[in-house]
Structures are given as C-alpha cells and as structure tokens.
C-alpha cells in the first residue's frame, strides 16, 4: 500500500462532540495520493469478474466512479431517498443516529450482473448491509464490497453477511 494514508485527516468533535471524523478531502485533492488509493482499492479485485460498480452516496460516488473508470466497467449510484427521477427500488435501514433510505433505479441492472459495492468508510455497517440487500432484491450478484477506511471499534463488519468478500484498505 502506498503512503496516501497520511492524507486522511482527523477532525475531532465532528459532526458532534465525541466523534472523531475521518476526512478524505485532502486525499481527494492530492492527485498522486488519490491515484495511489484507487490502485490499492482495485488490487484485491483484479481477478474478479465485475460488470458494474455501485457507489454509495455520497463519497462512495467519488471512489466508485473513479474505480469503475479504472476497471472499464459501468457505474450505478445508490442514492438517498428522492434523488432519482425514474422508478426506484428502496431499502430503509437503521443508523446509529436514526434511520435512512437508499434507492436505485429498478432498470439499472440486468439480472445476474456482477456488482462490486464501493464506499469510503465502513462504520457501523448499516449502510453497506442495506446496499447489499437492495441490490440482491434486484437479482444482481454482489461479488463483494470495497471500502477505503474501516472503523473497527464500531464493528460494522459484523453486519456484513458471510459468503461475500469485504475488503478495507485502512483500519482505524
């Protein structure tokens, strides 16, 4: 792994007191660091047959779309409720601070397509698990999930059902 990890900065007490936010914006602003991060994110999936990459709103869009371009595959966004204009499939899920809904266009995939989920951070695992559930409802095969940063103390990996790979680059 390249030394892009120093470009992720800690912001204490954001968005609320006691939270240590991991800010990836300095990483995104550094062309060489971002490119190195994308290469590291792609490496575990080099030999995996992937048709489409799905990025989870919002920072998962950045990493997912860039990784899709690098891999030469399509990109499909998983959006917050009310952001997509066509017919959608949705899933509601619990967060540590409330609830949320994710949506995807119903016609975004042909059944059986092989999908890699991408997000920036794995925290409590609710968003990633809900994303997998949503995609599987549409008949796609989730081959795995890739995240840049895993906050191990929140044990989000425990919400990821076994049988499908989950790769994280940096463990905090």
Image: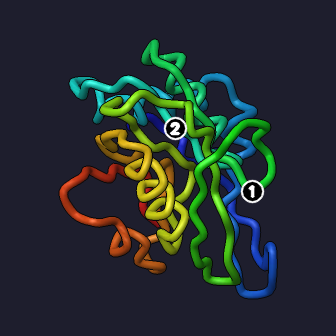
At x 60%, y 56%, the residue is: 90
Q: Is residue 36 toward the left or the right of residue 62 in the image?
A: left
Residue at horizontal 44 percent and vertical 34 percent from the top: 2
Which numbered dot is residue 30? none
Instruction: Name the residue at the front extreme.
Output: 87
Apparent side of residue 143 relative to residue 8 in the rendered image (left or right): left
Name the element at disc 2.
Answer: strand
Question: In this image, 35 relative to 26: left or right?
Answer: left
- Residue 99: x percent and y percent? 67, 77
Coloring scheme used: rainbow
Look at the image and tell me in which quarter the N terminus lies. top left
Q: How many marks?
A: 2
Picture quadrant of residue 76: top right
Which of pointers 1 and 2 lies earlier in the amino acid sequence? 2
Q: Circle 1 sits in a helix, a strand or a loop, which is it? A: loop
Identity of the residue drawn at 51% across and 26% down: 67
| Of residues 30 and 62, the one drawn nearer to the viewer in this rendering | 62
How many residues crowd around disc 1 within 10 Å: few (fewer than 14), some, or many (20 or more)? some
Question: Quick one: 119 or 19, which is closer to the camera?
Answer: 119
Q: Percent position (x, y) of residue 136?
A: 38, 50
Q: Are marks 1 and 2 in contact (CB under 8 Å)?
A: no
Q: Residues within 10 Å of mark 2 (few under 14, many from 20)?
A: many
Q: Residue under circle 2?
A: 54
Q: Where 50 sits versus 81, above or below?
A: above
User: Could you say where residue 68 lies in the image, as x and y percent from the top left?
Assistant: 51, 23
Q: Residue tagged by mark 1?
A: 81
Q: Position of residue 101 (x, y in %)?
A: 66, 64
- Residue lying furthest bottom: 18
Q: Nearer the viewer, mark 1 or mark 2?
A: 1
The residue drawn where x is 76% and y is 41% is: 84
The quadrant where residue 110 appears: top left
Q: What's the CA distance linking mark 1 and mark 2?
A: 16 Å
């Amino acid at each position: 792994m390249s030394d892009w990890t120093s470009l992720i900065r800690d912001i204490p007490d954001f968005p609320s007191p006691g939270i240590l936010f991991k800010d990836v914006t300095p990483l995104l602003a550094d062309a060489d660091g971002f490119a190195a991060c994308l290469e590291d994110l792609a490496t575990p999936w080099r030999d995996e047959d992937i048709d489409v990459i799905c990025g989870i709103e919002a920072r998962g869009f950045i990493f997912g779309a860039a990784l899709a371009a690098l891999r030469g595959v399509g990109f499909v966004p998983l959006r917050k409720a009310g952001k997509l204009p066509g017919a959608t499939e949705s899933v509601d899920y619990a967060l540590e601070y409330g609830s949320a809904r994710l949506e995807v266009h119903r016609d975004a995939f042909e059944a059986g397509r092989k999908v890699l989920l991408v997000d920036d951070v794995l925290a409590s695992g609710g968003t990633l698990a809900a994303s997998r559930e949503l995609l599987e409802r549409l008949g796609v095969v989730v081959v795995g999930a890739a995240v840049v940063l895993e906050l191990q103390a929140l044990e989000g990996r425990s919400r990821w059902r076994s049988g499908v790979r989950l790769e994280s680059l940096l463990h905090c």
